[in-house]
Amino acid sequence: MSAVSDRLPTFPWDKLEPYKKTAAAHPDGIVDLSVGTPVDPVPELIQKALIDAADSPGYPTVWGTPALRDAITGWVERRLGARDVTHRHVLPIVGSKELVAWLPTQLGLGPGDRVAFPRLAYPTYEVGARLARAEYEAYDDPTALDPAGLRLLWLNSPSNPTGKVLSKAELTRIVAWAREHGVLVVSDECYLELGWEAAPVSVLHPDVNGGSYDGLVAVHSLSKRSNLAGYRAAFLAGDPEVLGPLLEIRKHGGMMTSAPTQAAVVAALGDDEHVRVQRERYAARRAVLREALLGHGFRIEHSEASLYLWATRDESCWDTVAHLAERGILVAPGDFYGPAGERFVRVALTATDERVQSAAARLKR
């Protein structure tokens, strides 16, 4: 058996440890803006739904309860503008990272098959291809790819790390190209409800797909919109011809969302108010950090959506990480997301109001 190091890259976050120690030594403590993990409370109605379902001694189903599937289909139609969505069009998953890492394997991809993802991207797209022993490549424009052997095309809008949003016209063009060449499109839309200077659109919208879900799957998560990262709650929506076989494979693998979590997701997807409140929190933090970074000499690119500011001082990202760590602020180096990010850092909005204000004050000194 090959060593893990032969199959997978070095876990990137381990490289940040020395800088985290530096930042933690700041007299006023660390402001950790490196990881997009929620810090605000889980809304009470979601906690209550989880607690009410706590007495769940039996095994849950991989496909979820009918109530869960109803909640997902209803949300997909209401929020994404999709039409005629049935239970066959949806599939609960155990958090979106699990899906991204194992999807190529579950699709049966392997040597000779190709997976493509954006030039600046969440590292787990590459990890998933490596786990399946498939080939992989990064792109600037997916329609410029050689379609031979290309089995899986990842889209990510809004983007992690840049916050870039693909327009409806861009999505329509990409979907048409992929269908022409028989390429499965999986669109990671986990930040779709966090558009600031743009209105993100799903590949499931009829203006993008012409009213057909053929060859299309969208990935959605409740981690950011509902502060449910600790619950591992996410779902797929799209082509039943893709989701049906995935359901069968995931049954064999026991990839089931816990029954209390399923109940919590029903409550979360049925309530838009807590999402509005959380958006306002992030919008306020974004405004504070954006102003402070610009005042400190940073330039911010894209960042029109998502939970991050994509910022640069036109120097090595590690020099910027060190500069901010001396001020007690920890950020993610851009090269975690590909060589194209080597002069940028990703600044997360996921810190408390007090920590965000502290970071801004340090940058203004």
Image (spheres, rainbow, N blue to C red):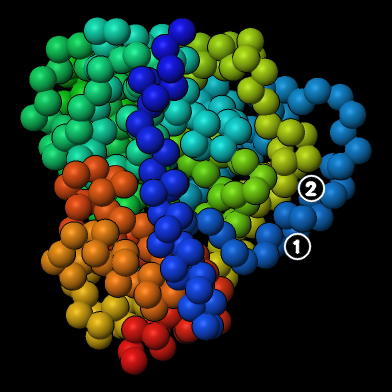
Can residue 188 be seen here? The reply is no
- The structure residue drawn at horizontal position 60% and vertical position 57%, both measured from the top left corner, is 227
Q: Compare residues 341 and 125 and report the one nearer the observer.
A: 341
Residue 237 image offset from top left, x and y in percent = 48, 31
Q: As displayed, is residue 251 above or below residue 342?
A: above
128 and 273: which is toward the camera: 128
Instruction: Return the x and y of residue 7 as percentages of the image width and height.
Output: 37, 20
The residue depicted at 48 percent of the width and 78 percent of the height is: 26
Measuring from the top left, give residue 175's x and y in whole percent. Answer: 23, 30
Question: In the displayed structure, would residue 208 be above or below residue 227?
Answer: above
Dot 2 or dot 1: first in sequence order is 1
The answer to whether residue 110 is above or below residue 57 is above
Residue closer to the observer: 23 or 165 = 23
Residue identifier under label 2? 50
Density class for disc 1 (Cα within 10 Å; few <14, some 14-19, many ≥20) is: few
Going by the numbered disc 2, the residue's amino acid type is Leu
Q: Are marks 2 and 1 in contact (CB under 8 Å)?
A: no
Disc 1 target residue: 44
Q: CA distance from mark 2 to mark 1?
A: 10 Å
Residue drawn at x 39%, y 85% is: 362
Q: Which mark is residue 140?
A: none
- Tell me which amino acid carries mark 1: Glu
